[in-house]
Image (cartoon, grey):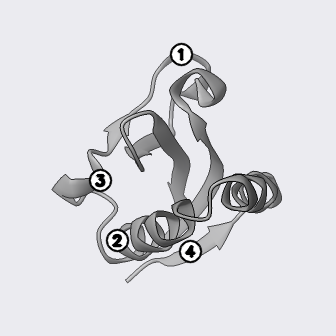
Amino acid sequence: MPKIKAEKSFSHKSFKLIKNNPDLQEKILKATKLLRQNPFDQSLKTHALSGQLKGKYACFLTNDMRIIFKIDDNVIHILDIGTHDEVY
């Protein structure tokens, strides 16, 4: 099972998001748990990114919220979180 490493930018933004919307905390915890178990679980709707984000993946948190991550040597680096427009 891969390890999860939340980058500083993700931690900072998720803290702000949770502060403004406490309901997101449970969704973020559930998504990160699923990422660790299987980053390509169907419920996450994980998809590869292109352009400047090539080599990275996005998964759905809510209809408009995404988590951006990359996978290196059995470590999932969670890089960013935000609305579709914020992270792309």
The earlier-in-sequence mark between 2 and 1 is 2
Dot 2 lies on which element?
A: helix
The earlier-in-sequence mark between 3 and 1 is 3
Mark 3 or 1, which is nearer the eye? 3
* Above or below, comparing residue 15 to residue 74 in the picture: above
Q: Amino acid at mark 2?
A: Leu
Q: Amino acid at mark 4?
A: Ile
Q: CA distance from mark 3 to mark 4?
A: 16 Å
The earlier-in-sequence mark between 3 and 4 is 4
Other residues around mark 4 within 10 Å, as few (<14) / some (14–19) / many (≥20): some
Examine the image and state in which quarter residue 41 appears: bottom left
Mark 3 or 4, which is nearer the eye? 3
Which residue lies under the disc numbered 1? Answer: 51
Image location of residue 82, percent across then percent down:
61, 39
* Above or below, comparing residue 11 to residue 88 in the picture: below
Cβ–Cβ under 8 Å for marks 2 and 1: no
Q: CA distance from mark 3 to mark 2?
A: 8 Å
* Above or below, comparing residue 19 to residue 5 in the picture: above
Q: Residue at x 45, y 42 (%)?
A: 57
Other residues around mark 1 within 10 Å, as few (<14) / some (14–19) / many (≥20): few
Dot 1 lies on which element?
A: helix
Cβ–Cβ under 8 Å for marks 3 and 1: no
Q: Amino acid at mark 3?
A: Leu
Residue extending farthest bottom: 1
Which residue lies under the disc numbered 2? Answer: 34
